[in-house]
Image: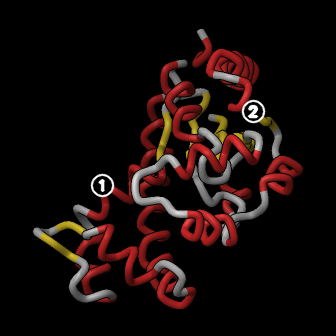
Amino acid sequence: MKILGLTGSIGMGKSTTARMFAEAGVPVHDSDEAVHRLYSGALAPLVEAAFPGTMKQGSVDRIELAKRVLGKPEALKKLESIVHPLVRADADAFLARHRVAGAALVVLDIPLLFETGGRGRVDKVVVVTADAAIQRQRVLERPGMTEEKFEAILAKQVPDAEKRRQADYIIDTGQGMESARRAVSAIVAELGGENSA
């Protein structure tokens, strides 16, 4: 079973690209989705213990949590030390299930793949990219996003040029959906074996 790591900076179209892999029949583990799910499960009491008052009705209140960690490197590090091991365990369980099921190719959608040293967990890396102006426009259209927040997020991500330099495959989502879909199909055909049937 080949493990393909999918990553890209904020606003580059990674989630849309992950859906294209899923539509092509490739099992996808979405780290962001896992965090959402775990925030309503195993992570909620752990986060509440570290950041009292962030749990509402048994789930982590993401807005309250963001107020506690954004722009506070120590708090963010503390949160990541709680979250990352559980997300990693969730991904490992996903890999084990699909290995048993005989999948030829799976995708681990890891937003901070390079930042968290995740390169060694995957066989190949796809980096999703777009022109900086397109990226900025997409991100600033998100509800609650500000220039300041965007810059803070960018500052802790490996620069796009460096990600592209380390990539095995690059998908430029600025070229439109059809172009991205063709790139996904080509990668699945190359790596997928029976997945690509």
Residue at 25%, 79% in the rendered image: 54
Check disc 2 and give the amino acid type. Asp
Instruction: Please say if 192 is above or below 44.
Output: above
Q: Which mark is residue 172?
A: 2
Q: Earlier in the sequence, mark 2 or mark 1?
A: 1
Label 1 belongs to which residue?
37
Q: Is residue 99 visible?
A: no
Q: Is residue 105 left or right of residue 157?
A: left
Instruction: Please say if 61 is above or below 82.
Output: above
Q: Position of residue 20 (x, y in %)?
A: 55, 25
Instruction: Please say if 29 is above or below 60.
Output: above
Residue at 85%, 57% in the rendered image: 162
Q: Residues within 10 Å of mark 2 (few under 14, many from 20)?
A: some
The secondary element bearing badge 1 is classed as: helix
Q: Position of residue 60 (x, y in %)?
A: 26, 69
Q: Name the quarter where the C terminus is drawn.
A: top right
Q: Residue furthest right?
A: 165
Q: Which mark is residue 73?
A: none
Check disc 1 and give the amino acid type. Arg
Q: Which image quarter: residue 83?
A: bottom left
Q: Residue furthest top?
A: 197
Q: Front-most of 105 and 152?
A: 152
Q: Residue furthest left?
A: 57
